[in-house]
Image: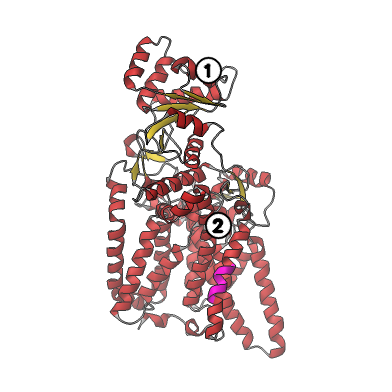
Amino acid sequence: MHLTSVLPRSVQTAGRPVTGRIRRWVRWLIPVCYLLIAFLLTWRVWAAPTLRAPTPGSTKVLPDVYLNVWFMHYAANAVAHGHLPALVTTALNWPQGVNAMWNTSLLLPSVVLAPVTLIWGPVASLAVLLTAGLAGSALAMYVILRRWGASYPAAIAGGAVYGFSPALMAAAGDHYHLEFAVLPPLIADAVLRLVTGRAGPGLRRILRTGGWLGLLVAAQVFIAEEMLVDTVLVIAVLLIFLAASRPRAILVGLRQAAAGLGVTAAVVLLLTGPALWVQFHGPLAETGSPWRISQYGNRLQDFVTASQSVLTHGTLRQFVSFLNISHQRLVEYYAYLGWPLLILLLSVIIVCWRDLRIRTAGLSWALLELFSVGGHTVRLHGLRIPAAVLPWHYLWHLPVLGQVLPNRLAILADGAAAAVLAFAADRAWRWTLARPAEQRLVLRCALVAAAAIAILPALPKPVTAGLVSEPPAGWRDVIAGLRLRPDASLLVLPVYGPSTMVWQAEANEQVSVVGGYCIAPGTGRRAAECDTHRTLSRTQQGVLIRLNLLGQGLPASFGPSSRAFGEALMRWRPAAIITTRGGESPVGRYLTSWLGRPTMEHDQVLGWRVPGNRWLMAHLEQARGPDA
């Protein structure tokens, strides 16, 4: 039995025939419409694309965005010098450095958008990526639904459900690497076409599909590896449910797809092999995750509690209060669909159970949503659901999956939900054709009304935006006056890594940043956040705490001892130190007492050149006072 037989005949005949001229117009009109919707949802960012970035419901731009700003500038600077960005660099988190493959570096989008970055700046590039991610995700799902038999209207609606879903709109507030969910549907489609035989007859088509799949996978590696792992898990779930329905056909299909999958593996190895080697065996290779994975997971209430990414949300204060009670983060809220849509999806799966496409996509959606709850104990209105009942409890200990945040699986679960709704819409529409003519209009109006009621609570609202932190007045002048060599290291005090990174990127300064907001190897090479106790010595940590308290102007705060400060500087080895608090601030007075008169001063920005370790050692010998 050939695998194409597992699909209903409607796959080839769904929808009314479309003439060639209309088809060409539709092919152009649909992406334009998706792009227009994406612009409407991101208009606050486009109001000032070089200055504004998305936020998760407030006016404060979060540090993850600043990390992406920095990597956009980093990649564009490399392209401007005629080479690709290095995978290991000390331009961030000096002197240790970072491994770009262990950070959300968006290497491929950063290289592609390098011309935009060089002309308009990294913040503008992120605005382009944000809009392209929403519109591109919708278009990718539309293309896949059409390929698997959905009519034009159903595929258009299904693409919109996925591309502008509550999960992707939540990701748009902070996580560009998750919001750009264009490739996962294409990857899943290529695998299913190979396994089901829909890649076409002949070895050439199988090999061509395998090569296309390899390119998609390689591209996803350099966008977001976590999303690739999630996609592989989704494909595995789809194949398991297909195999449960047509076991012999799946076995035959896997044997026929072996050649194509072999080409896929060869392409992926060729394009990503060196980068993956650097990631897992090169300098600054890491293990584990800096986050406590066991704490992540959607709560059952999340599926019906509206987030700030949809029109039907409540007040931000109430929502934040709910998140605090349920111990969740605002930027990790992906589960919401709403009662009407959940009821519709479950009803459709039951009613259309015999349709293999709906059954497979529907069961996959349900299991992915269950996975997204995580593997920890869940409480619902006093009812305690033990972790052993949840399937993720048995998966998150496995290699690779142990570094995946399960709540993010809800993003791809929305894609499965979109497929269910699209295929079900076609079946319902065809069902009305069998009714008497006088009943058709009433039935179709009822179907449209039911769909509108279900979708209404999940309709997205425009992304909120805030101003990206700009370099303080005098920043560029002070750095220019310090006359630092290219890639010289810069320590900014008090320390707040995200601001330093975005100032460097916005000002296009060719300096290395001491510390920063990033991930680097900590104790035992375990992944850890930069500028924390896991990556700093006890002396460095104490100095940062004292100086940050001093910067806050607390009455009882005082700076670190000269000895502690000198020892910390010897570990950081900065070529220059800058403060933006002014010479009369507590931090400014402390640095002046230790380093002497500033080398360069402009407005509230003070800069000192640090001669080197010999000068520091001589300074330490003269230092007196208790340890910090």
606 lies above or below 451: above
Say what amino acid the circle numbered 1 marks: Arg
Residue 422 counted in the magenta span: no
Query: Quick one: label 2, few (<14), some, or many (20+) residues within 10 Å?
Result: many
**Crowding at mark 1 (Cα within 10 Å: few <14, some 14-19, many 20+):** some
Residue 239 lies in quadrant: bottom left
Pointer 1: what residue?
A: 589
Identify the amino acid type marked 2. Ala
Scheme of colours in the image: secondary structure
> Residue at point 49% right, 72% down?
143
Which SS class for mark 2?
helix
Q: Between residues 212 and 24, which one lies in front from this camera angle?
A: 24
Report the front residue among 452 and 104. Answer: 104
In the rendering, at what x and y percent does residue 429 appear?
61, 81
Q: Magenta span covers which residues?
A: 27-33
Residue drawn at 72 percent across, 82 percent down: 442
Q: Residue 394: give x, y in percent of width and height.
A: 40, 54
Front-most of 555 and 39?
39
Residue that mark 2 sits on: 167
Q: Position of residue 186 (x, y in %)?
A: 43, 67
Sequence-first tag of 2 and 1 = 2
Q: Distance between the residues labelled 2 and 1?
A: 48 Å
- Identify the image quadrant of the C terminus: top left
Which residue is at a point 37% across and 10% down the rendered structure image? 622
